[in-house]
């Protein structure tokens, strides 16, 4: 059943083009010739991220352009649709040079219309999109964020790494995560994370006890809040529990942007090293290498955990929106005595 689920999640892969970008004397972005026998440049954009006319784009989104072939030279200009507020872009080219990631020098303006102009082979192509309201300054004071709790539904997270195994990840990580704001002190913030559960009436609860033992929370201290309403949090590690199996996630990172009214945070991303060695019983197997062998068959690979054993899988999730919730059994920071 698990294998069928994974196969259904797979996408086809295109063979990589081994050609490399040319220079001014040997141009790769050609596909024909004119009457004089000279090669004619015909490369053009084949894919934009964000897509043309996309709406509600996150103001810290990653932009990229794919081309129909390797490119020797291209220029990029990003500004508001009326031409104002040009954005400084840094280009990060793939090898071969048929795709480029564009990194903006500063976050885009929220709730605004943008136009990205790409000039290649003597032609200019324009991609338009609009940003969402995330990034709008807070309408509440930072202190009013304290004691608010936000719900991340892992089953709704878009897992982008490792490639092709999102279905496997979601067989283990489908529990809700609660994120509580404990303190805000200038540019610093303290967050606490916890496992949650949804009761039969849809109420949100914190999981505080399991098998007569306390379930610890996870501290995020020194959270970067220097660019409010954006935050970035790191923890040495958290432990998720699925069907009685502990799944440690080392070097756990969480980031996002609070909405102006603080009723949610959006544009969220998370990543960390998930220790898979104890998860085999969840697939009715006993070999601690089972999950690593399974993901290897789909082109992914485990890497060393902090203890040096190769059982860890790097996970990255994106497009997280977490709404503020009322925790029925009241959120509580739980630290186990050593």
Image (cartoon, rainbow, N blue to C red):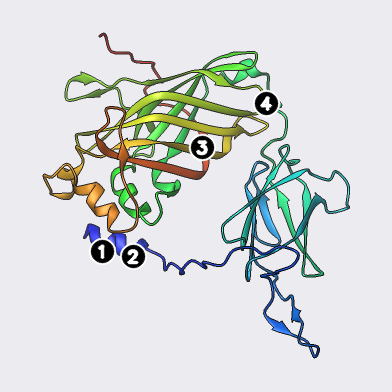
Q: Is residue 147 visible?
A: yes
Between 94 and 104, the one lying in front of the other is 94
Whether tag 1 and tag 2 are in contact, CB under 8 A, the answer is yes
Q: Label 4 to label 1, Cα distance in Å? A: 44 Å
Q: Label 1 to label 2, Cα distance in Å? A: 6 Å
Crowding around mark 3 (Cα neighbors within 10 Å: few <14, some 14 to 19, many 20+) is: many
Please give the residue where the numbered disc 2 appears in the rendered image.
Answer: 8
| Chain-order first, disc 3 or disc 1 | 1
User: Image point 19% across, 34% down: which residue?
Assistant: 244
Q: Label 2 to label 4, Cα distance in Å? A: 40 Å
Crowding around mark 2 (Cα neighbors within 10 Å: few <14, some 14 to 19, many 20+) is: few
Number of numbered discs: 4
Q: In the structure shown, which secondary structural element does the residue marked by tag 3 occupy?
A: strand
Above/below status of 173 relative to 145: below
Q: Residue 260: where, in percent of width, then height?
A: 68, 32
202 left or right, relative to 208: right
Please give the residue where the numbered disc 4 appears in the rendered image.
Answer: 227
Please give the residue where the numbered disc 3 appears in the rendered image.
Answer: 322
Whether tag 4 and tag 1 are in contact, CB under 8 A, the answer is no
| Chain-order first, disc 4 or disc 1 | 1
Please give the residue where the numbered disc 1 appears in the rendered image.
Answer: 4
| Chain-order first, disc 2 or disc 4 | 2
Q: Label 3 to label 4, Cα distance in Å? A: 19 Å
User: Image point 73% across, 85% down: which residue?
Assistant: 33
Q: Residue 137: where, in percent of width, then height?
A: 72, 30
User: Image point 76% across, 87% down: which residue?
Assistant: 37
Crowding around mark 1 (Cα neighbors within 10 Å: few <14, some 14 to 19, many 20+) is: few
What label sits on residue 126 in the rendered view?
none
């Amino acid at each position: 059943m698990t294998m069928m689920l994974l196969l259904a999640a797979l996408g086809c892969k295109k063979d990589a083009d081994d050609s490399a970008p040319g220079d001014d004397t040997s141009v790769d972005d050609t596909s024909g010739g004119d009457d004089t026998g000279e090669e004619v440049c015909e490369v053009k954009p084949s894919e934009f991220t964000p897509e043309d006319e996309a709406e509600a784009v996150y103001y810290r989104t990653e932009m990229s352009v794919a081309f129909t072939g390797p490119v020797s030279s291209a220029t990029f200009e990003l500004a508001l649709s009326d031409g104002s507020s040009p954005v400084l872009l840094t280009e990060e080219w793939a090898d071969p040079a048929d795709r480029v990631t564009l990194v903006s020098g500063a976050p885009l303006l929220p709730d605004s219309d943008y136009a990205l102009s790409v000039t290649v082979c003597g032609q200019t192509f324009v991609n338009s999109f609009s940003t969402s309201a995330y990034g709008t300054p807070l309408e509440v004071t930072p202190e009013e964020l304290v004691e608010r709790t936000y719900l991340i539904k892992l089953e709704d997270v878009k897992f982008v790494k490792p490639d092709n195994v999102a279905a496997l990840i979601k067989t283990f990580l489908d529990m809700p995560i609660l994120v509580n704001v404990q303190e805000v002190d200038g540019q610093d913030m303290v967050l606490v994370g916890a496992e949650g559960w949804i009761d039969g009436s849809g109420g949100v609860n914190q999981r505080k006890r399991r098998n007569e033992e306390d379930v610890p929370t996870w501290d995020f201290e020194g959270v970067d809040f220097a660019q409010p309403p954006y935050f970035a949090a790191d923890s040495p590690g958290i432990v998720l529990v699925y069907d009685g199996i502990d799944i440690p996630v080392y070097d756990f990172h969480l980031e996002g942007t609070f909405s102006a009214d603080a009723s949610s945070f959006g544009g969220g991303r998370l990543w960390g090293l998930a220790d898979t060695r104890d998860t085999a019983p969840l697939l009715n197997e006993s070999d601690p290498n089972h999950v690593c062998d399974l993901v290897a068959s789909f082109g992914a690979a485990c890497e060393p955990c902090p203890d040096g054993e190769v059982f860890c899988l790097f996970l990255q999730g994106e497009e997280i929106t977490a709404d503020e919730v009322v925790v029925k059994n009241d959120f509580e920071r739980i630290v186990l005595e050593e």
